[in-house]
C-alpha cells in the first residue's frame, strides 16, 4: 500500500467543494483503501463527514450494525473503521460504548449495547483488561489455573452477550508487554507475564464457541513491533488501545475480519506467470532458462511465493492463471521444471493467450462461475495492472513492487482472503472444480441434455439445518451472490435460532454424483406463521447450476408446506447487479406475480395446483418433526 499525498487530499477537497459528490465518494474510498498513514486516514474521515452532510452515502452490498465495547477508549476507532469498511463494500451503523463499561454492556438488558442489538460486537482489549496475573514465581500448576480462570471470564462474558443480542462477537486477543522485568530468566519461569499472555491467547483460541472470532492483535503487534504498537502516553492520557502510529493496521485488520464475517472475502487468486511465479519470460528464455528454484536469490523468492499460493489453495482459495503467452509455452515449465511447487493441476482455470488481460479475467470468472469481485490478481507488470483496473474496476489488483521477495507479504496485507472458517468444502474446492471440468467434458459429448443429467447419477440429501452443518450454511449465506433470490445476509446466530423455531422450515441440499461429492450446495429458509409459507432465504452454489436441484428443492418445499397446512408459498426476488441469473426462477417454477413491493418482486404459488417436477436426482429426505397439531383452517 502507498501513502496518500497532500495533492490527492487536495483533489478530494476540490471535488467536494465543486459539488462533484459521486466523484468525491469514489476518490475518498480509493484513498482510504491505500493509505498507510493515520493522520491521512483521519483527514479522510473528516472529508467523509463533509460528504455525508452534502448527500446520502452510496449504497453498499452489505450493511452491518457494529458495537465497539471493551476496556479501552473506542471513540478513536469509530469513524476510521466505518470508512475502511466502506472500502470493502460494507456500510455500517456503529455504536461505541462508554469507556470501561464492558460488564454493564453485556449483563444489563437496558444497556446501550443491548438495546442497540448489534450484528457484530467487537470487544477491544489490552493487557490491562486482564484482571488476574500469576505471581512471577508461581508454579506451572498455578499459572494454568490462572489461565483457565481468565479464559472462563471472557467466555462467560461472550456467552452472555450472545444470548442477549444473538450477535457474532469479535474478541481482541492480548499483545505482549513491552517490559520484561525478569529479563532472560523469564523464558524459564512459568509466571513470566508474557508467557502467561501467550498461554491465555492459546487457551482462548482453543475454547472459542462458534459465535466468537479472535482478532489476532497479538500477531499484529508482533509484526509492527510491540514498542510501536502500544504507546504508554496515549494509554495514560486517553486509554487508547493502540498507538496513533498503528491505528491504520488495527482498523484495517478489524474491517477485514468483519468483511469475512459478511462474505466479502475473495475466492480466487489469479496469477500472471512471467516474473510473477518465475523469473524471466518463458517465450523468450524457454522453460529451461527461467529463474526458479534453490541456489538463486530470485529463484528462491519465486518459490516462496508459489508456496504461499499453494497454502492459500489448501485452505480453499481457488488458483487460476491469466498470462499473455502461447498456451504451450505457458504450460511447459509445469511439466519440465521439477523445482516448481505449483503444478498445472493446482489451477482451476488456465488462460494463456494474447488478448488483453481484462478479457482473460472475464474468461476465468466465466469458467469458475464467479463474480469479478471474487478475483484477486497478482501481476508484476504495472501497465497490465492499470489496464485491469480501468476495464474491470470490480477486480482486486495487488500493487506489488519489483522484488518478488515482497509478493507474499504484500498479498497477505491486503486482507482480501481473510476467513473465519475453513470448512471441508473449502479444502476440497479445487478438487470440486476439477470434477466440474470432467462433468463439462461429458456434457460436451452428450447430444441430449437430459441424457447427460441422467448419466451423472446424481444423489441429493435434503435435510433441515443441523448443528453439524450450520457453519457451512452461514458461510453460504454470507458469500453467495449470484444464485441468491433475496440476498438476505443472515448471521450464524440467526440461522441457529431457526433450528429450534417451530415456525421455520429450513433445508440444506448435499449433492453427489459419479464424479465426486459437491458438498452442501444449497440453502433455503422459510417461515409459516399462518397458512402461508414465506421464503426468506434461497441460495445455491453456482457450481451446480442447471442440474435440477432447484426443481427437487421446490418439490420438497411444497410437500412440507402442504404438511403444515399451508395454502400458498410466497417468495420474493430482490434484484442486485449480481443475481440476474435467478430473475426468472419463480416463474419457471410455476409461481405467479403477486403485486409490487419496494425493492423486490413478490411471487406466490398455490400449493394445491402445483405439479411436482420430474427430476433425475435420487433424493434422500431427512424429515424434521411437524410442529403443529394439524392443518390450519
Image: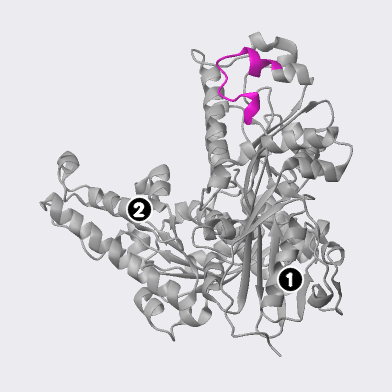
Residue identified by numbered label 2: 206
Do we see residue 178 in this rendering? Answer: no
User: Which residues make up the magenta segment?
Assistant: 332-346
Badge 1 crowding class, 10 Å Cα cut-off, few under 14, some 14 to 19, many 20 or more, is: many
Pick the front one: 186 or 31: 186
x, y percent for residue 22: 79, 62
**For discs 1 and 2, the disc positioned in front in the rendered view:** 1
- Most extreme residue toward the right is 447
Q: Is residue 471 left or right of residue 107?
A: right
Residue at point 53%, 46% (across, down): 424
Q: Secondary structure at mark 1?
A: helix
Quadrant in the rendering for residue 516:
top right
Pick the front one: 563 or 485: 563
* Above or below 219: residue 343: above
Q: The C terminus lies in which quarter of the figure?
A: bottom right
x, y percent for residue 317: 60, 41
Q: Is residue 7 left or right of residue 296?
A: right
Q: CA distance from mark 1 to mark 2?
A: 43 Å
Residue at point 77%, 22% (across, down): 325
Asked if the magenta segment contains residue 248, the reply would be no
Tell me the tag on residue 558.
Answer: 1
Asked if the magenta segment contains residue 345, the reply would be yes
Q: What colour scheme was applied to this rendering of the protein?
A: one colour
x, y percent for residue 75: 48, 70
Amino acid at each position: 500500500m502507498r501513502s496518500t499525498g497532500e495533492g490527492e487530499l487536495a483533489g478530494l477537497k476540490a471535488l467536494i467543494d465543486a459539488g462533484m459528490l459521486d466523484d468525491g465518494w469514489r476518490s475518498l474510498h480509493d484513498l482510504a483503501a491505500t493509505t498507510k498513514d493515520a493522520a491521512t486516514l483521519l483527514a479522510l474521515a473528516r472529508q467523509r463527514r463533509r460528504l455525508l452532510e452534502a448527500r446520502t452515502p452510496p449504497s453498499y452490498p452489505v450493511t452491518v450494525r457494529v458495537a465497539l465495547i471493551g476496556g479501552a477508549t473506542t471513540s478513536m476507532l469509530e469513524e476510521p473503521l466505518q470508512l475502511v469498511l466502506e472500502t470493502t463494500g460494507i456500510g455500517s451503523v456503529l455504536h461505541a460504548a462508554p469507556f470501561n463499561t464492558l460488564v454493564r454492556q453485556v449483563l444489563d438488558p437496558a444497556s446501550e449495547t443491548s438495546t442497540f442489538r448489534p450484528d457484530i460486537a467487537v470487544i477491544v482489549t489490552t493487557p490491562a483488561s486482564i484482571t488476574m496475573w500469576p505471581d512471577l514465581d508461581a508454579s506451572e500448576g498455578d499459572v494454568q489455573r490462572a489461565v483457565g480462570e481468565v479464559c472462563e471470564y471472557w467466555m462467560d462474558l461472550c456467552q452472555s452477550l450472545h444470548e442477549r443480542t444473538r450477535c457474532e462477537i469479535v474478541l481482541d486477543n492480548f499483545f505482549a508487554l513491552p517490559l520484561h522485568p525478569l529479563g532472560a530468566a523469564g523464558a524459564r519461569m512459568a509466571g513470566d507475564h508474557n508467557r502467561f499472555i501467550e498461554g491465555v491467547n492459546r487457551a482462548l483460541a482453543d475454547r472459542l464457541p462458534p459465535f466468537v472470532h479472535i482478532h489476532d492483535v497479538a500477531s499484529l503487534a508482533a509484526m509492527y513491533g510491540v514498542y510501536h504498537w502500544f504507546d504508554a502516553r496515549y494509554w495514560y492520557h486517553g486509554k487508547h488501545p493502540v498507538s496513533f502510529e498503528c491505528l491504520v493496521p488495527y482498523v484495517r485488520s478489524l474491517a477485514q475480519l468483519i468483511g469475512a464475517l459478511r462474505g466479502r472475502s475473495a475466492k480466487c487468486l489469479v496469477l500472471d506467470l512471467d516474473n510473477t511465479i518465475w523469473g524471466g519470460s518463458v517465450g523468450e528464455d524457454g522453460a529451461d532458462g527461467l529463474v526458479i528454484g534453490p541456489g538463486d536469490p530470485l529463484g528462491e523468492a519465486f518459490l516462496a511465493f508459489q508456496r504461499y499460493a499453494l497454502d492459500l489453495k489448501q485452505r480453499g482459495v481457488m488458483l487460476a492463471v491469466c498470462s499473455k503467452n502461447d498456451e504451450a509455452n505457458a504450460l511447459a515449465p509445469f511439466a519440465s521444471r521439477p523445482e516448481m511447487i505449483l503444478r498445472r493441476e493446482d489451477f482451476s482455470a488456465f488462460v494463456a493467450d494474447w488478448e488483453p488481460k481484462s478479457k482473460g479475467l472475464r474468461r476465468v470468472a466465466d469458467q469458475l462461475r464467479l463474480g469479478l469481485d471474487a478475483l484477486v490478481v497478482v501481476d508484476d507488470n504495472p501497465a497490465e495492472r492499470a489496464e485491469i483496473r480501468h476495464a474491470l474496476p470490480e477486480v482486486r489488483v495487488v500493487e506489488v513492487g519489483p522484488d518478488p521477495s515482497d509478493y507474499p507479504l504484500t498479498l497477505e496485507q491486503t486482507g482480501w482472503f481473510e476467513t473465519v472458517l475453513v470448512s471441508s468444502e473449502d479444502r476440497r474446492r479445487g478438487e470440486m472444480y476439477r470434477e466440474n471440468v470432467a462433468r463439462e467434458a461429458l456434457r460436451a459429448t452428450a447430444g441430449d441434455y437430459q441424457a447427460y443429467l441422467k448419466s451423472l447419477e446424481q444423489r441429493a440429501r435434503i435435510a433441515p439445518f443441523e448443528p453439524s452443518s450450520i457453519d457451512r450454511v452461514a458461510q453460504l449465506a454470507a458469500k453467495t451472490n449470484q444464485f441468491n433470490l433475496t440476498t438476505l445476509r443472515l448471521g450464524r446466530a440467526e440461522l441457529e435460532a431457526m433450528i429450534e423455531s417451530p415456525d421455520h422450515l429450513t433445508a440444506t441440499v448435499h449433492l453427489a454424483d459419479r464424479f465426486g461429492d459437491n458438498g452442501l450446495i444449497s440453502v433455503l429458509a422459510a417461515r409459516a406463521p399462518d397458512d402461508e409459507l414465506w421464503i426468506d432465504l434461497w441460495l445455491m452454489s453456482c457450481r451446480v447450476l442447471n442440474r435440477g436441484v432447484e426443481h427437487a428443492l421446490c418439490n420438497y418445499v411444497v410437500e412440507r408446506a402442504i404438511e403444515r397446512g399451508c395454502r400458498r408459498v410466497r417468495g420474493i426476488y430482490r434484484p442486485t447487479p449480481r443475481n440476474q441469473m435467478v430473475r426468472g426462477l419463480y416463474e419457471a417454477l410455476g409461481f405467479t406475480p403477486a403485486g409490487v413491493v419496494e425493492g423486490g418482486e413478490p411471487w406466490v404459488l398455490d400449493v394445491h395446483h402445483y405439479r411436482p417436477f420430474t427430476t433425475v436426482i435420487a433424493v434422500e429426505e431427512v424429515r424434521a418433526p411437524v410442529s403443529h397439531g394439524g392443518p390450519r383452517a
